[in-house]
């Protein structure tokens, strides 16, 4: 399980160091892809396979299903952490998430999200400001 929020810097080669607490869970490779809200999602191989099995069952005739599968799968890349726990973020993914120097690595249970620092702070501020409303809607769903 991935939890917590960590600030890191991209190095000159486009790599980030994964938090030490995440490294053992990740193992020898991680699948990184375009996420929602302009962040990147990173999955262990096991969790990626679980997601892929769900994606393949989406109806091919629905344009939203096709678009979501394309977003997640066509943009995905398997990367291997080096001995220092750094992973190379491909250029097209850095551009998608508008990465500059500072990024935030957030553990979100079964995935890691990697955010542009400013985008994360804006998102977090908006979410925290509407937390009562969000909690009420989730309460309607039985959470």
Image (tube, grey):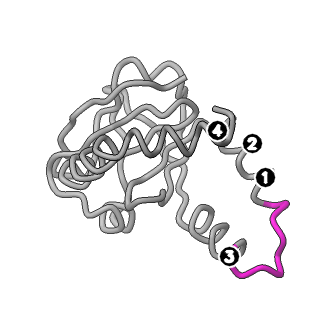
Name which of mark 3 and mark 1 comes first in the sequence. Answer: 1
Where residue 42 appears, x then y in whole percent?
Answer: 49, 44
Marks 2 and 3 sit apart, C-alpha to C-alpha, by: 20 Å
Q: Earlier in the sequence, mark 4 or mark 1?
A: 4
Say if mark 2 contacts mark 3, CB within 8 Å: no
Judged by its main secondary structure, the magenta piece is: loop
Residue 10 percent location from the top left of the image = 20, 46
Q: Residue at x 66, y 44 (%)?
A: 48
Residue at (22, 52) in percent of width and height: 122
Question: Residue 116 colored magenta?
Answer: no
Contact (Cβ within 8 Å) of mark 2 with mark 1: yes
Between the residue at mark 3 and the residue at mark 4, the CA separation in whole angstroms equals 25 Å
Residue 50 got which mark?
2
Which disc, if any, is residue 64?
3
> In which image quadrant can residue 9 be found?
top left
Residue 10, above or below 70: above
Give the tally of numbered discs.
4
Q: Residues within 10 Å of mark 4 (few under 14, many from 20)?
A: some
- In space, the residues marked 2 and 4 are separated at their CA atoms by 9 Å
Q: Nearer the viewer, residue 135 or 49?
A: 135
Q: What is the crowding at mark 2: few (fewer than 14 residues within 10 Å), some, or many (at least 20)?
A: few
Please give the residue where the numbered disc 4 appears in the rendered image.
Answer: 45
Q: Are marks 2 and 4 in contact (CB under 8 Å)?
A: no
Residue 11 lies in quadrant? top left
- Residue 62 magenta: yes
Q: Nearer the viewer, residue 20 or 113?
A: 113
Q: Which residues are magenta?
A: 56-64
């Amino acid at each position: 399980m991935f939890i917590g929020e960590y600030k890191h810097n991209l190095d000159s080669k486009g790599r980030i160091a994964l938090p030490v607490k995440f490294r053992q869970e990740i193992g020898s490779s991680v699948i990184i892809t375009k996420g929602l809200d302009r962040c990147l999602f990173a999955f262990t191989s096991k969790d990626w396979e679980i997601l892929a099995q769900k994606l393949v069952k989406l109806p091919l005739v629905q344009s939203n299903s096709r678009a979501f599968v394309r977003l997640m799968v066509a943009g995905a890349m398997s990367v291997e952490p080096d001995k220092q726990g750094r992973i190379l973020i491909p250029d097209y993914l850095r551009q998608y998430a508008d990465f500059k120097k500072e990024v935030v690595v957030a553990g979100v249970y079964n995935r890691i999200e990697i955010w542009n620092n400013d985008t994360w702070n804006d998102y977090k501020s908006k979410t925290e400001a509407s937390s009562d409303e969000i909690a009420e809607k989730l309460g309607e769903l039985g959470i």
